[in-house]
Amino acid sequence: MRDLDVLIIGAGAAGLMCAIEAAKRGRRTLVIDHAKKPAEKIRISGGGRCNFTNLHCRPQNFLSQNPRFCISALKRYTQHDFLALVDRHRIGWHEKTLGQLFCNDSARDIIDLLLSELDKAGAALKLETSVTGLSKPDDRFSVETNHETIRARSLVIATGGPSIPKMGATGFGYDVAKRFGLNVVPPRPALVPLTFSDANKALCAKLAGVSVDAVVSFQKTLFREGLLFTHRGLSGPSILQISSYWQEGKPITVNLAPEQDAFETLRAARTETPKQDLKTALAAFLPKRLADELAAEFKLTGRLADCSDKVLRRAGDLINRWQLVPAGTEGYRTAEVTLGGVDTKDLSSRTFEAAKVPGLHFIGEVVDVTGHLGGFNFQWAWSSGHAAGQAV
């Protein structure tokens, strides 16, 4: 039997950060994970270059039933703190759009940074270790694994959510929370492509591979980023963002030409080039393939001179206010993160400790805090892991 101060289950971004901070404070710390390698979600993130944080990170970039919960951790360990750590390790990085920071070379650089800091702090890492039993018989936790039984004063759950199951992701953290009497906000896939089952599915399939800059909105929330047509529906950054807000059975609104009032532009074109075909005029706003398919699907044909204001308005609404009702999402298979999780009402926003169970902490994606696309979820991992590491 091994006796520890801190046992962390989950060797991802949050778990490793927590272990580093706990070990720095002299705590006997071990991280275990059932996977063969640590931080696999880091490795595949950002196209293999890891979008490790965002320069504009703020509480408004996160969804939770308690929007204020994330404030404390984000304030105490900021994007600038993690960037300073990246710079100390001399990792090259660059900024893409909207404050997103990526490694110049490889996501492996971030993993190596974390493992180096882990080793320097004196924490241990044990992989291919599965939990077979978990209890708290006294003031310490008892965790049975396929290798040994571990006793620890503090237990940190950093196992993430069930998104990307091919990486070994499961709902283990939710099961632990429920076992100890904590509430779990029902999880669902987030930052995920949307799918269709009606005529729009066939239309999207015809347009698979076409991308446009678009504003996609749901109720009062909107995002302006790229939109991509797929064989099953819609994807791209703007769609992934809105998927975290979309509610089943309700429409999203897509503006395919955010810079233009399509109706007014078409009316002006009717005066200036009356012999032009409406389908050709649509190509002034959209990629030709998209213009052609929309014109055919919605019967937008004929010369501009023969098109009434009603027809032009219908075309304008299609371009600027296209409403579609998704059938669903692609699910956890392609979801980048999980919405929902361990209810923040049951956790301390400063230490991430469960109010009902002294010594039990939940951090990272397993908690009901979900960031926007663009490095925010990694920053939540760094901030929440750092906060718990200062407390255990």
Image (cartoon, rainbow, N blue to C red):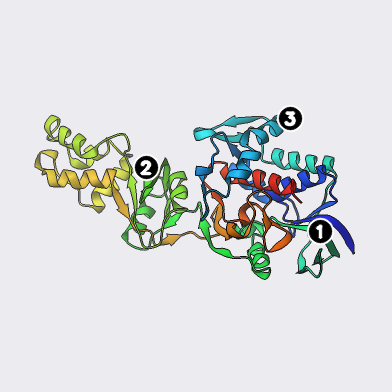
Picture coordinates of residue 173 (x, y %)? 66, 62
Q: Residue at x 37, y 53 (%)?
A: 204
Instruction: Say which label, 1 or 3, has the lower sequence index.
Output: 3
Query: Disc 1 vs disc 3: Cβ atoms closer than 8 Å?
Result: no
Mark 2–mark 1 Cα distance, whole angstroms, equals: 49 Å
The answer to whether residue 302 is above or below residue 56 is below
In the rendered structure, which amino acid carries the disc numbered 1?
Arg
The answer to whether residue 99 is above or below residue 179 is above
| Disc 1 target residue | 153
As drawn, is 300 to the left or to the right of 155?
left
In the rendered structure, which amino acid carries the disc numbered 3?
Arg
Between label 2 and label 1, give the one nearer the viewer: 1
Picture coordinates of residue 168 (x, y %)? 66, 60
Toward the viewer: 79 or 126?
Answer: 79
Q: Residue at x 68, y 64 (%)?
A: 356
Picture coordinates of residue 236 (x, y %)? 46, 46
| Disc 2 target residue | 215
Instruction: Say which label, 3 or 2, has the lower sequence index.
Output: 3
Crowding around mark 1 (Cα neighbors within 10 Å: few <14, some 14 to 19, many 20+) is some
Instruction: Say which label, 2 or 1, has the lower sequence index.
Output: 1
Mark sitting on residue 240? none
| Disc 3 target residue | 88
